[in-house]
Image (cartoon, rainbow, N blue to C red):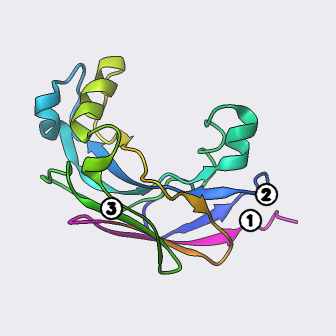
Amino acid sequence: MIGGGEIVLPPESSRVDYEGELALVIGRRIKSWPEERWLDALAGVCCANDVTARDLQKKDGQFARAKSFDTFCPIGPAIVPDLDASDLAIETRVNGVVKQSSRTSQMVFSPAFLVAYVSRMMTLLPGDLILTGTPAGVGPLAPGDVVEVEIEKVGVLKNRVAADERRG
């Protein structure tokens, strides 16, 4: 989902968390890409919210279902090209309250490392996304919440949270 849409809480889950992240948008076909040329591989970067049904992740022992519901992982508000995102401020707010605040340079893996590492395992194609991980402070969302992921020089991804009409 491109930024601005609703994040719909599925009835299958009782705990859905926000995870503000930097998304790297691949701009060309790459395989075994050298780390020092990571910027040449990108179309740009954008904000992402790697929404996760945390209870289902724990129940399943992995995250495929927990991260795959419709409306999960909104991105946006736009793809920003030609930006070295290796040291940018990243912040997530819920209802205006700061919940996550860090810098991309403090993440476990750098954007350069991730592009090189992932491209060693698989061929990446234009439009593929690599999410870089989330700072400390993930937490639950509730119907009516407004969640914002802001990355310096990139913009603000803003989404309202809604209950699924199938919820009892």
| Dot in front, 3 or 1 | 3
Q: Is residue 43 left or right of residue 145?
A: left
Q: Is residue 160 magenta?
A: yes
Count of residue discs: 3
Q: Earlier in the sequence, mark 3 or mark 1?
A: 3
Q: CA distance from mark 3 to mark 2?
A: 30 Å
Q: Is residue 18 above or below residue 143?
A: above
Q: Pick out the residue farthest to the right.
A: 168
Query: Which residue is labeled 1 in the image?
Result: 164
Query: Which residue is labeled 3 in the image?
Result: 90
The amino acid marked with disc number 2 is Pro
Query: Looking at the image, can residue 71 be seen?
Result: no
Query: Which residue is labeled 2 in the image?
Result: 11
Whether pointer 1 and pointer 2 mark residues with C-beta atoms closer than 8 Å, the reply is: yes
Q: Quadrant of residue 158?
A: bottom left
Q: Which residues are magenta?
A: 151-168
Query: Which residue is nearer to you in this view: 168 or 100?
Result: 100
Q: Considering the numbered disc 2 on the image, is that residue within a helix, a strand or a loop?
A: loop
Q: CA distance from mark 1 to mark 2?
A: 6 Å
Q: Earlier in the sequence, mark 1 or mark 2?
A: 2
Q: Position of residue 58 (x, y in %)?
A: 70, 39
| Dot in front, 3 or 2 | 3
Q: Considering the numbered disc 1 on the image, is that residue within a helix, a strand or a loop?
A: loop
- Residue located at (17% from left, 54% from top): 81
The amino acid marked with disc number 1 is Asp
For residue 75, the mark is none
Would you call the spot at circle 1 few (<14 residues within 10 Å), some (14-19), or many (20 or more)? some
Q: CA distance from mark 3 to mark 1?
A: 29 Å
